[in-house]
Image: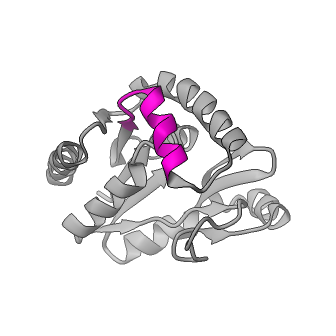
Amino acid sequence: MQKVIIFSAPSGSGKTTLVKHCLQEFPQLQFSISCTTRNPRGEEQDAIDYHFLNPNDFRKKIEEDAFVEFEEVYEDKFYGTLKSEVERIWKAGKVVIFDVDVKGGISLKKYFGDQAMAVFIMPPSVAELELRLIARGTDDLETIKTRVQKATHEMTFKNQFDKIVVNQDLDAAKKDIENIIENFLCS
């Protein structure tokens, strides 16, 4: 059976750090590069971190039914997973690993069903999440405020995921994730 592993979390929970750890620990996993209309942050590169599209090109792909899932997270800020990306990874004999927002994670779990292991990464608290976002230095305070409000709402969906991992201590969270993935890959 072709499998997928889905990581979702509020922004700033440590999801991307944990996904990168999994990619180092499990050579059978391959990262699914999402599409987005937002601008690159920091040193992000097109076709490595994301496929960066303008809103019109993204809408065209929606019309073409090119996505497994997509979401307009903020006005004109789309994220989505291309069907072609999943097929490319499966053809290479790998297991797909996703790093997606919460709504995307729920959509992917519904789409893939038993082929998927959906993991929700929880921050230790909303206050800690806000501190992490500030420390990142990639967003202004107004954007951080919006992200924190959104995160509070997103945490209400955690029970729609197969597993919940609280990322208070990164090493402990890594161990939890390793156990989850090992069990899923062996099932």
In the rendered structure, the answer to whether residue 16 lies left or right of residue 182 reads right
Q: Can residue 29 be spotted in the picture?
A: yes
**On screen, residue 93 above or below 162:** below
Task: Pick the quarter of the image with the N terminus.
Answer: bottom left
In the rendered structure, the answer to whether residue 23 lies left or right of residue 6 reads left
User: Which residue occupies 33% across, 59% down?
Assistant: 2
Farthest right residue in view: 56
70 and 13: which is toward the camera: 13
Image coordinates of residue 118 in percent, x first then y, are 37, 41
Reply yes or no: does residue 129 show up in magenta. Answer: yes
Reply yes or no: does residue 39 show up in magenta. Answer: no
Question: Picture quarter containing residue 75?
Answer: top right
Numbered-mark total = 0
**On screen, residue 131 above or below 94:** above
User: Which residue occupies 80% across, 67% down?
Assistant: 57
* Residue stretch rendered in magenta on the structure: 121-135
Question: Picture quarter containing residue 160?
Answer: top left
User: Which residue occupies 44% across, 46% down?
Assistant: 112
Q: How is the image coloured?
A: one colour
56 and 127: which is toward the camera: 127
Image coordinates of residue 102 in percent, x first then y, are 52, 38
Q: Can residue 108 be spotted in the picture?
A: no
Image coordinates of residue 97 in percent, x first then y, are 38, 59
Q: Main secondary structure of the magenta part?
A: helix
175 and 113: which is toward the camera: 175
Image coordinates of residue 27 in percent, x first then y, are 23, 71
10 and 79: which is toward the camera: 10
